[in-house]
Image (tube, rainbow, N blue to C red):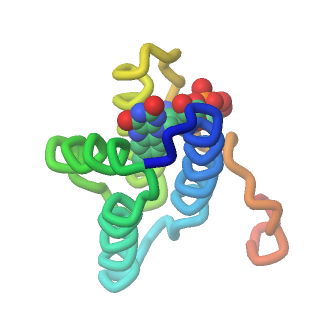
Amino acid sequence: KLGNETAKAELGRAAWKYFHTVMARFPDEPTADESSALKSYVYLFQRLYPCGECAEHFGELLKEFPPQTSSRSAAAVWACHVHNQVNKSLNKEIFDCANIGDFYDCGCADDETDGSG
Ligand code: FAD
């Protein structure tokens, strides 16, 4: 436990940023191995999340809302939804998941073949 609300919030912002950016870069048409890797990543992200109470709460959410890894959009909308569940429990604003497609930019457009990343 960090025992410091400022540090906990900062960790949360950084972790969510990374989490959503992973989803935004996941393939549109993943292989079975890629889908399996993303699912493992989500469960390990939860298991190893440094804030114990957060990890415990997020583990309950993963039971209720298992990771969706069949495509980029399924993963991104799923991640948006679980983040909104955390927002709700912390009395924060609900994010509009319809806008998730454009929101997380990794700054790595060079690896995109269509130049839109
Ligand atoms: P954050 O919730 O950190 O969001 C950062 C930014 O992401 C927002 O400013 C917005 O631009 C965008 N955003 C907001 N909602 C969404 C969404 N649904 N989808 C995509 N983008 C969005 N804190 C606790 O006190 N108790 C907990 O139990 C707890 N559990 C957590 C579990 C996990 C897995 C993580 C990653 C964090 C957890 N946190 C918890 C931290 C908490 O979620 C916030 O990160 C922290 O309170 C800072 O909040 P914030 O208002 O700056 O915005």
- Residue at point 49% right, 65% down? 28
Residue 66 at x, y = what percent? 22, 52
Q: Who is closer to the viewer here, 70 or 3?
A: 3
In the image, what residue occupies the spot 16% across and 42% down?
A: 64
Q: Position of residue 39 (x, y in %)?
A: 31, 68
Image quarter of residue 111? bottom right
Total marks in image: 0
User: Is residue 63 left or right of 112 when viewed as pictured?
Assistant: left
Q: Is residue 37 visible?
A: yes
**Is residue 83 among what the camera can see?**
no
Q: Residue at x 35, y 69 (%)?
A: 44
Nearer to me, 110 or 62: 62
Q: Residue at x 30, y 81 (%)?
A: 32
- Most extreme residue toward the left is 63
Is 112 drawn above or below residue 98 in the view shown? below
Q: Is residue 35 left or right of residue 13?
A: left
Q: Position of residue 14 (x, y in %)?
A: 64, 49
In the displayed structure image, the side of residue 63 where residue 29 appears, left or right: right
Of the pair 92 and 94, the residue shown nearer to us? 92
Residue ranking furthest to the front: 3
Quadrant including the C terminus: bottom right
51 or 112, nearer to the observer: 51
Outermost residue to the bottom: 33
What percent of the width, then of the height, locates residue 112? Answer: 74, 72
